[in-house]
Image: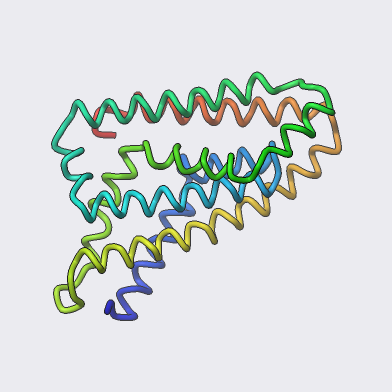
Amino acid sequence: MLALDTLLAFLAISAAVTVAPGPDNLMVLGQSLARGRVAGFGIAVGCALGCFTHTLWATLGVSALLLASPNAFFALKLAGAAYLFWLGVQALRSGGIAAAERSEALALPWRRYVARGFIANAVNPKVALFFLAFLPQFARPEAGPASTQMLVLGAVFATQTVVVFGAIAFAAGGIGRLLARRPRLGPWLDRVTGMIFIGLAANLLLGGRRG
């Protein structure tokens, strides 16, 4: 069992990392502004699930294999960048749609946003390598098997991710709702969201083979 002081230190650092500007919270922010709180919270949950997936990879050693293979690392970066670019193009194309079509777009099933957040996070090799380096630092020999400790820490990280990103979604969604009362701003919200996704794609792809 992990000591309370270890868990609290891990939680504090994890929250600081989660709040710091990055691809995931920018996705939550952009989708919340353009599509509302439900969409933003869906992205948040998807990102949290992706984080726990990276915990499993780090625990099983898959992330270490990824680090040892430059070609696999770059291939995963390429897939992640392509997915983010596709989301950006979709957002840009939705700018300027009619009010009825916009209402239909806003009514997309919540699970669609969860899937978007999960895929965007899960195919980001930089996140995989972060977890590979971050989690073992808090594992203590006297606390039991390192793999079990890492799974617990990963669950804690995923949980606080939902809380922090959920707060961002709630705040940004409220702002988006106010802006949506001005129909002319709707297309611009979509364009901002699209540019965020495309910018994230470029950052992931061009940020160096090892990020």
Q: Provide residue 65's location: percent of width, then percent of height.
A: 16, 41
Quadrant containing the N terminus is: bottom left
Q: Is residue 143 above or below residue 66?
A: below
Residue 203 quadrant: top left
Q: Provide residue 40's location: percent of width, then percent of height.
A: 62, 46
Q: Provide residue 192's location: percent of width, then percent of height.
A: 63, 29
Number of marks in the rendered image:
0
Residue drawn at point x = 43 percent, y = 58 percent: 158
Judged left or right of residue 76, residue 136 is: left
Q: Is residue 150 above or below residue 186?
A: below
Q: Provide residue 89's location: percent of width, then percent of height.
A: 57, 20
Judged left or right of residue 8, residue 26 is: right
Judged left or right of residue 79, residue 75 is: left
Q: Closer to the camera, 12 or 73? A: 73
Residue 28 quadrant: top right
Q: Is residue 22 above or below residue 59?
A: above
Q: Is residue 29 above or below residue 80?
A: below
Residue drawn at point x = 82 percent, y = 26 percent: 184
Quadrant containing the C terminus is: top left
Q: Closer to the camera, 179 or 146? A: 146
